[in-house]
Amino acid sequence: MKRLLLFLFAVASLLTAVALSGSAPQPSASVDAPVQVSVEARNPWTHLRVNRSAEQFHFAIISDRTGGHRPGIFSRAVELLNVLQPEFVLSVGDLIEGYTTPEKARGQWKEFQSYVSRLQMPFFYAPGNHDVERPDTAGVWQEKFGRRYYHFVYKNVLFLILNAYDGPEIDTKNGKRFKAEFSKEQLAYIKQALEDNPSVHWTIVALHPPIWTQANVAETGWLEVEKLLAGRNYTVFCGHIHHFRKFVRQGMNYYQLATTGGVSSLRGVDYGEFDHISWVTMKADGPVLGHLLLDGIYPEDMKKPITEEGGNVPGSGVSVAPVNGKVFYRGCPAVGAEVVFHPVQSTGKRRAENARGRVEADGSFCLTTFRAFDGAVVGDHRVSITWYPPATANGGPRGTNRLPERYARPETSQLTATVESSSRNEFVFELTD
């Protein structure tokens, strides 16, 4: 009987312990878990596998600031980068206006460095055409920064910063410049950097222009760069065009960034024209990207940072007026065609004063010259219209113009328009074969 009572007591104690274990808090399964919390049979969360690993880190990329930089934009991006707190910041070049005397270039670099010196994290320079294409301003880069291409490794990721303006000096009507290509020395450097880092789990390439879109790409050395990169995981970032676009080459992603203060009509995301910071989360299986528009980033007090950065915005003093209209080809809307108004009388920067518009689904277009949908320069214009198929994802040739070739040039299109400051300025173009 005594043994029976002891057995029953033991069973009762065990059942009590089991019952209590269903309601009493228990410690986390592992003392090394990043979240220290009491775990019960039912818990108000999905799981405790936090999105973290030893390889994971964050960095940011900024794009072009040239061609007529707008006041207060890049310097505001610097303040917002300090809010975002990436581990470092990478550029894709065109940081100063350049194309000037060495003395003025030094002043521009001094101004630029006064902004990036405020960053709480490292900033990695990349050379753009405004920075190093001309030998005299390239000399200033050499004085201040030395190398025009280099690499570094961080958390088993290789970063290759390349110089696409490394060819021989050539004469142009605007003076000497370096040809847009990769020298044999730079190609050898890239080859060695890749051979020295065979086991990195990803490679990030930064350069200024999307050189793979050039008609003479085979002459630039870029295809040799791609051969060296073939077989490894990599991502390419560039700028230069001030228009966002994604390419896929060799199964890898190439990103052409928009602007971070550079000249842009800022027509919005649909046109690829906006100011942004690219936010990269580097994980073991590759980068995860988010493009953050500057107007959507605010500090904790929701006050937009105001800085003293000046600007060099084109179009000051030029009179423009709103212009819209429609384009039809064979009686149907020419959806996706580009309309360009070319001023007959120019102030000297003819290309900068051209007004452009994209034909929408109903055939309508709205012109932009300096700022989003501001119109065209007041006065007489010749008009050209082209209609190319959508750009290919790999950056190849854009295809054949769907319109008769005479419409592609203002000299032969026979299309004209007069823009008046006190008029609705609506034009309809009916195109035929």
Image (spheres, helix red, strand yellow):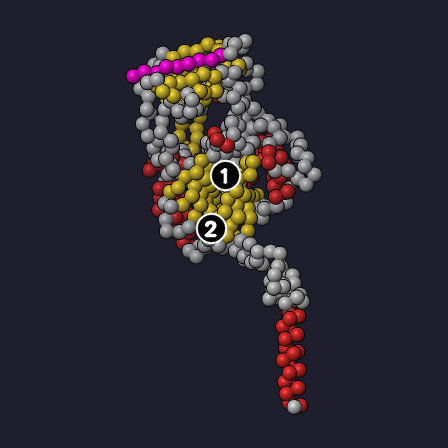
The answer to whether residue 239 of the structure is visible from this angle is no
In this rendering, would 406 be left or right of 40? left
In this view of the protein, which residue sits in the foreground, 51 or 287?
51
Question: Which mark lies nearer to you, 2 or 1?
Answer: 2
Asked if residue 274 can be seen in this view, the reply is: yes
Label 2, secondary structure: give it.
Answer: strand
Q: Which residue is drawn at 40% across and 36% down?
A: 211
Residue type, numbered disc 1: Val
Q: Is residue 51 above or below residue 17?
A: above
Q: Do the residues labelled 2 and 1 touch (CB within 8 Å)?
A: no
Q: Residue 99's x, y, as percent?
A: 50, 28
Q: What residue type is labelled 2?
A: Gly
Q: Dot 1 corresponds to which residue?
A: 92
- The earlier-in-sequence mark between 2 and 1 is 1
Is residue 167 depicted above or below 407 in this figure? below
Instruction: Report the residue at 39% width, 24% height from top.
Output: 335
Q: Is the magenta stretch mostly helix, strand or loop?
A: strand
| Image: 386 above or below 108 | above
| Residue that mark 2 sits on | 286
Question: Which image quadrant: the N terminus?
Answer: bottom right
Q: What residue is rendered at 63% in x and 63% in y?
A: 39
